[in-house]
Amino acid sequence: MSTLIKDLSKEAPRSPRIQIGGYPILARALDKGRAELAGQVGEYHFNCPLDNVLFGFKGVTGEEIHSLLADGKNDGEIVAWLNAHGTPKTAEEITEWGNAFEKISGHNDPERGEWFDGECRRLGLDPSSASLCDMLEADDQQSFAK
């Protein structure tokens, strides 16, 4: 599996929808972590609140994942580590969590709703039907449009 280091000042990390080991957001988080270690993270942030949705679900920390990345672990090795550490999850729990993750929307969030709605409108998305994944993908696309 991938250990490619992307220069996130020139290209976007992988989509939050891309799943590794059944975990959405993991591929994106790993891209950001590797880019951070290489000094190529651009405007992105590893161990951000969204990465922590996954880390919290599994009961691990961004620091632990960062350490694995610093040790040169590839995607498959990190998935194996993730499955063996933190809060045990069944395949069904991971699938259920992944399906719910892809539907997360900030539209009705009392703390982030105004920000989310504004970002969606800026990107040409309907805040009432857009997911956070939709918003992130549209933002990545706009940021790197030629």
Image (cartoon, rainbow, N blue to C red):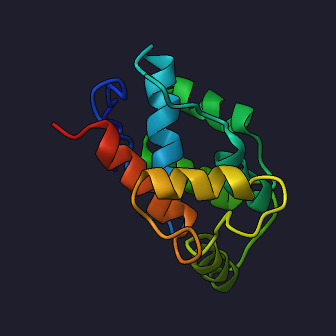
Total marks in image? 0
Q: Does 61 sit above or below residue 133?
A: above
Q: Which residue is farthest top?
A: 39
Q: Is residue 2 left or right of residue 48?
A: left
Q: Position of residue 73 (x, y in %)?
A: 48, 36
Q: Position of residue 92 (x, y in %)?
A: 65, 86
Which residue shows up at 64% across the image and 47% down it? 51
Q: Position of residue 119 (x, y in %)?
A: 54, 50
Q: Is residue 100 left or right of residue 21?
A: right
Q: Is residue 130 left or right of residue 59?
A: left
Which residue shows up at 62% across the image and 30% down it? 66
Q: Position of residue 141 (x, y in %)?
A: 30, 48
Q: Quadrant of the C terminus?
A: top left
Q: Does 129 sit above or below residue 131?
A: below
Q: Quadrant of residue 23?
A: bottom right
Which residue shows up at 39% across the image and 60% down it? 124
Which residue shows up at 76% across the image and 41% down it? 61
Please state which of residues 9 and 92 is positioned toward the viewer in this rendering.
9
Q: Which residue is farthest left?
A: 146
Q: Is residue 107 left or right of residue 110?
A: left
Q: Is residue 140 visible?
A: yes
Q: Is residue 2 visible?
A: no
Please state which of residues 93 and 138 is positioned toward the viewer in this rendering.
138
